[in-house]
Image (cartoon, coloured by chain):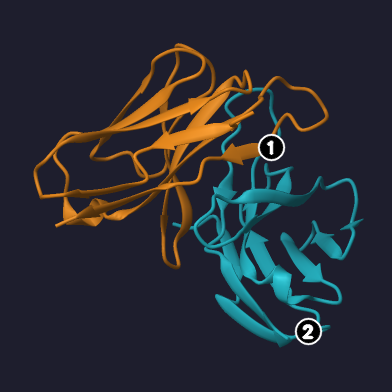
Chain colours: A cyan, B orange
Amino acid sequence: QQQVKQSPQSLIVQKGGIPIINCAYENTAFDYFPWYQQFPGKGPALLIAIRPDVSEKKEGRFTISFNKSAKQFSLHIMDSQPGDSATYFCAASTYKAAGNKLTFGGGTRVLVKP
Amino acid sequence: NAGVTQTPKFQVLKTGQSMTLQCAQDMNHNSMYWYRQDPGMGLRLIYYSASEGTTDKGEVPNGYNVSRLNKREFSLRLESAAPSQTSVYFCASMRGDGGTSGANVLTFGAGSRLTVL
């Protein structure tokens, strides 16, 4: 069973548009929610992360919105650029010292057209 | 600073053959992980090692074994490969020292693409 459900599977937007990716989790013990970005032929890399003590976090053009009561979080890419074309994964875990196991969503392939 | 290095990058096996994927990190990280990536399934954890000397099963451990050789190296072995193990495998490491800054960030290798015929 997939503990983190991610949607949509793919997304096409024009340059300047705002792709939105949604994730829902089941385990109420999760308290760490990162997003990873993966370019073709590369390993994923951390993009941005949030803890449940805040409802929103911004880093540059990337924003995470977090709704603890709904057990949902989302990624918005403001003013999207062709260079943002990549696969995005949400993830969740409990935040602990060692052996932290991230559970990943299924991924969203984003294409930003020029 | 190489980060996480995986070998080989590509491998083709026949059903029933065995092989070992090698992984090494040079960041003095405590925790290491093996994930597999399949279309639509995201990244699924196969095995992990919270610290040197320990290993634990993840979500999809069947058909795999691991060895944490030392703090730097974590290998994944397929004893008798099956077509269902055709996938892209990623090794990752995490500082995992409980610190507040970056302790839970996974650093991934570039991946190993395995095809089992």
| Amino acid found under the numbered disc labelled 2 | Lys
Where does label 2 land, which residue? Answer: A15
Q: Position of residue B25 (x, y in %)?
A: 54, 26
Q: Quadrant of the N terminus of chain B?
A: top right
For mark 1, name the chain: B
Marks 2 and 1, Cα distance to the nearest angstrom? 30 Å
Q: In the image shown, does B74 or A97 lie closer to the viewer?
A: B74
Give the secondary structure at mark 2.
loop
Amino acid at the residue labelled 1: Val
Helix, strand or loop under label 1: loop
- Circles 2 and 1: CB distance less than 8 Å? no
* Residue B93 found in image quarter: top right
Picture coordinates of residue B99 (x, y %)?
79, 23
The residue carrying mark 1 is: B105
Q: Residues within 10 Å of mark 2 (few under 14, many from 20)?
A: some
Vertical position of residue B99 compared to residue B42: above or below? above
Classify 10 Å Cα crowding around label 1: few (below 14), some (14-19), many (20 and above): some
Residue under the point 68% across and 23% down: A97
